[in-house]
Image (spheres, rainbow, N blue to C red):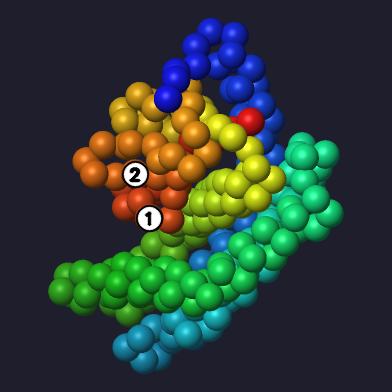
């Protein structure tokens, strides 16, 4: 293990910032589609005459599933093209594309659970709005307005968090799996610091370079092959913008 500093770290971060710029574009596209999915929750509220206020959570879950499946598929293909330009000379024909296909297959296996968790969270939050309004003696019209306001809020905050987390998780895994496939030797953790509050343990890893098969030690018993490793707990993953570069 070694720690990069000075010019070496600066050059690695330049490479990382180029990747993050690409990711930012992917995240914004996925975020906008997710935002529309959230806003669809309010489509039946104004016509509601029942206690569920006309919110179709089943349709919402289907929309989220489709958005994530389609969005991640496009992202992995674009990242495959990027990695081909970056590492194409070091790989055999089809290696990088094969990794992208496997990432997509694995993602589809789990996307249903992701969509269900997102839906359950939205249902719980909106049920709380109804419960609070009912306890306060609000009219149906006022509760409906509160629901619509809550949905608009979720459409902004939740869509951003989901888009950023899903995009970065998948792309970090794709980068790592591809690096292993084309026989890269080392990886360097880079803390880019785009979050409002830096995670101290991520900041401490900035510039740390280890062997491709070694794991980064995040403390508290958490180890990762790369930032946003699927085995890390949510508090180490959500809204993380760290990434690894390989050589």
Specify the quadrant that holds the N terminus. top left
**Disc 2/disc 1 C-alpha distance (Å):** 8 Å
- Where residue 105 appears, as percent x and y from the top left, is 62, 71
Q: Residue furthest bottom?
A: 50
- Residue 167, placed above or below residue 242: below
Residue 23 at x, y percent in the picture: 64, 43
Q: Is residue 205 above or below residue 42?
A: above
- The answer to whether one can see residue 241 in this image is no
Instruction: For label 2, count other residues whose C-alpha is less than 10 Å away and answer few (under 14), some (14-19) or many (20+).
Output: some
Q: Secondary structure at mark 2?
A: strand
So how many labels did they put on this image?
2
| Quarter of the figure that contains the C terminus | top right
Residue 181: x and y in percent read 65, 50
Q: Is residue 178 left or right of residue 170?
A: right
Q: Quadrant of residue 136?
A: bottom left
Q: Earlier in the sequence, mark 2 or mark 1?
A: 2
Please give the residue where the numbered disc 1 appears in the rendered image.
231
Residue 156 image point, x, y percent: 50, 53
Q: Is residue 202 left or right of residue 21?
A: left
Q: Are marks 2 and 1 in contact (CB under 8 Å)?
A: yes
Q: Residue at x 31, y 67 (%)?
A: 125
Q: From the image, tell me which residue sits under label 2.
A: 223
Residue name at image x 47 percent, y 22 percent: 207
**Above/below status of 11 relative to 232:** above
Specify whether 33 is left or right of 229: right
Q: Nearer the viewer, residue 240 or 190?
A: 190
Numbered mark located on residue 62 in the image: none
Relative height, residue 113 to residue 1 (above, below): below
Q: Secondary structure at mark 1?
A: loop
Along the viewing direction, whichever of 35 and 98 lies nearer the viewer: 98
């Amino acid at each position: 293990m070694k720690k990069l500093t000075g010019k070496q770290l600066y050059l690695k971060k330049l490479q990382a910032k180029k990747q993050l710029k690409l990711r930012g574009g992917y995240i914004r596209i996925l975020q906008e589609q997710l935002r529309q999915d959230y806003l669809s929750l309010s489509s039946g509220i104004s016509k509601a005459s029942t206690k569920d206020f006309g919110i179709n959570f089943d349709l919402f879950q289907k929309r989220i599933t489709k958005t994530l499946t389609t969005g991640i598929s496009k992202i992995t293909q674009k990242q495959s093209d990027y990695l081909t330009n970056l590492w194409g000379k070091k790989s055999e024909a089809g290696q990088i594309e094969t990794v992208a296909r496997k990432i997509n297959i694995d993602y589809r296996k789990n996307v249903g659970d992701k969509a269900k968790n997102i839906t359950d969270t939205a249902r719980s939050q909106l049920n709380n709005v109804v419960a609070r309004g009912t306890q306060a003696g609000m009219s149906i019209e006022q509760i409906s307005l509160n629901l619509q306001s809550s949905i608009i809020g979720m459409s902004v905050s939740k869509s951003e968090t989901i888009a950023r987390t899903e995009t970065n998780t998948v792309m970090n895994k794709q980068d790592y799996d591809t690096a292993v496939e084309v026989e890269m030797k080392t990886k360097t953790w880079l803390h880019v610091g785009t979050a409002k509050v830096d995670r101290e343990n991520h900041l401490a890893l900035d510039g740390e370079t280890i062997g491709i098969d070694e794991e980064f030690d995040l403390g508290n018993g958490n180890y990762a092959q790369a930032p946003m490793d699927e085995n890390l707990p949510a508090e180490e993953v959500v809204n993380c913008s760290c990434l690894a570069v390989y050589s």
